[in-house]
């Protein structure tokens, strides 16, 4: 039996410590912000001695405890709130929270840090607890609004990366995409409306960028350490996560759902907007994995047409949905969303795919993993013994019988 110890600490970015008592943190590939959290804290403060009237305490002197007669004062230790420290936990001041999970098991040690924006503070003065709600920096792109029209992105249409870097630096000075090998695409070979590349007054940074990156089949993601990436459908994080009933899975379930809006194999996106002359314009973008399709979904967007691509992006992402596995295990703080996963539950074929959502429960030291997966044959190369490759198949045999 494997044992593990989980130690959680947190502080504001100015170094003020926070007394963590529980909460949760999650990473989700279908959500923006990509990372969200809720931390439960005790009020900041310190233990201090205070005097209280005790009718059964002997008097110990008029100058200190009373008049020397029976009855007097006694000492009790009480938690005294640091009001200034509590006031410092204020999301309006752009304060950030640094959370650290330090894990030691029989086989490894690991430290995982999160640097997240504080979005809300809820202080319960009756029971002396504080709840913080946190998010990765996509939330800051929603906070920012343009004051005037900005046409600079038109000059950068050769690269959606360049447009993203321009906008990120507007909102968060110094911020930029961190990996020069991640996805990119250009508007120069695309049929699009020029107004799609103009930031309009009152428009948020995320509302401007989202249709542009999605038209290229991409997502703009900020991780827990403020690293920005553009991710296409092939993106995976490093490592892998095996979950097996009877070995490390505490609970497990599977759901297949055709009626859910998350699954479809065709889509029509309708763009409606007013041009510079105030005339309403409409363009459509349609895509199907094959004809005839089985289920279509309609998206309506009130933004200038950014070119064909969003419907294809949405349909291809939906193919990993519809079949969903959920399992809980002891928290493995090396786990990420979009990590390769192998899910083995009783009564169903082994599933392979990627994690869609990972949620860490600080109260129970557990995590719940949601996967989007496909059936995998027992003969797949994924399950060959260590040191054996699919190319080792006997002469005359087909390696296609060993495909994942």
Image (cartoon, rainbow, N blue to C red):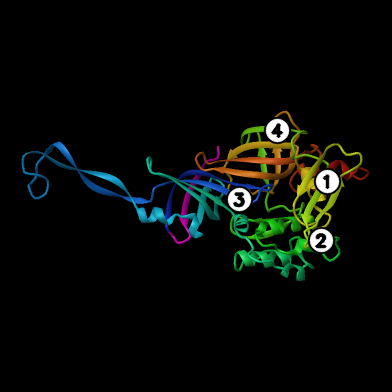
| Alpha carbon separation for disc pair 4 and 1 | 29 Å
Dot in front, 1 or 2: 2
Q: Position of residue 171 (x, y in %)?
A: 61, 64
Dot in front, 3 or 2: 2
Q: Nearer the viewer, residue 251 or 163?
A: 163
Q: Earlier in the sequence, mark 1 or mark 3?
A: 3
The 10 Å Cα crowd at callout 2, few under 14, some 14 to 19, many 20 or more, is some
**Residue holding disc 1:** 268
- Viewed as shown, does residue 206 lie left or right of 104? right
**Residue holding disc 3:** 35
Residue at (63, 36) in percent of width and height:
247
**Residue holding disc 4:** 254
Q: Position of residue 100 (x, y in %)?
A: 51, 53
**Residue holding disc 2:** 193
Q: Dots 1 and 3: beta carbons under 8 Å?
A: no
Q: Earlier in the sequence, mark 3 or mark 2?
A: 3
Q: Which mark is residue 179?
A: none
Q: Earlier in the sequence, mark 4 or mark 3?
A: 3
Q: Earlier in the sequence, mark 4 or mark 1?
A: 4
Quarter placement of the N terminus: top right
Residue 125 against residue 91 in the figure, above or below: above
* Magenta part of the chain: 1-15
Dot in front, 2 or 4: 2
* SS for dot 2: loop
């Amino acid at each position: 039996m494997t044992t593990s110890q989980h130690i959680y600490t947190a502080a504001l970015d100015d170094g003020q410590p926070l007394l963590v008592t529980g909460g949760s943190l999650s990473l989700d590939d279908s959500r923006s912000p990509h990372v969200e959290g809720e931390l439960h804290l005790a009020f900041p403060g310190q233990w201090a001695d205070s005097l209280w009237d005790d009718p059964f305490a002997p008097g110990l002197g008029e100058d200190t405890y009373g008049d020397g007669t029976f009855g007097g004062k006694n000492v009790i230790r009480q938690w005294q709130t640091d009001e200034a420290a509590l006031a410092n936990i204020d999301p309006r001041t752009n304060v950030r929270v640094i959370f650290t999970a330090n894990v030691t098991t029989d086989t490894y040690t690991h430290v995982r840090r999160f640097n997240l924006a504080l979005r809300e503070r809820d202080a319960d003065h009756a029971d002396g607890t504080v709840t913080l709600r946190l998010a990765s920096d996509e939330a800051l792109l929603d906070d920012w609004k343009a004051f005037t029209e900005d046409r600079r992105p038109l000059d950068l249409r050769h690269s959606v990366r360049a447009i993203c870097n321009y906008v990120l630096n507007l909102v968060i000075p110094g911020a930029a995409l961190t990996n020069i090998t991640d996805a990119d695409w250009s508007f120069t070979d695309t049929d699009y409306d020029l107004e799609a590349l103009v930031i309009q007054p009152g428009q948020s940074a995320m509302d401007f960028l989202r249709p542009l990156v999605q038209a290229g089949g991409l997502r703009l993601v900020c991780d827990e350490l403020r690293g920005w990436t553009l991710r296409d459908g092939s993106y995976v994080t490093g490592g892998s996560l095996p979950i097996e009933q009877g070995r490390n899975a505490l609970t497990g379930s599977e759901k297949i759902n055709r009626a859910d809006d998350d699954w479809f194999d065709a889509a029509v996106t309708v763009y409606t907007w007013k041009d510079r002359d105030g005339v309403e314009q409409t363009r459509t973008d349609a895509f199907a994995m094959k004809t005839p399709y089985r289920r279509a979904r309609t998206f309506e967007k009130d933004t200038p047409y950014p070119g064909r691509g969003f419907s294809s992006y949405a349909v291809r992402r939906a193919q990993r949905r519809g079949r969903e596995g959920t399992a809980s295990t002891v928290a493995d703080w090396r786990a990420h969303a979009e990590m390769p996963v192998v899910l083995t539950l009783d009564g169903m074929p082994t599933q392979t795919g990627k994690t869609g959502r990972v949620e860490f429960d600080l109260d129970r030291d557990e995590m719940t993993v949601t996967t989007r997966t496909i059936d995998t044959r027992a003969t797949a190369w994924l399950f060959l013994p260590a040191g054996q490759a699919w190319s080792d198949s006997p002469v005359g045999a087909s390696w296609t019988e060993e495909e994942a």
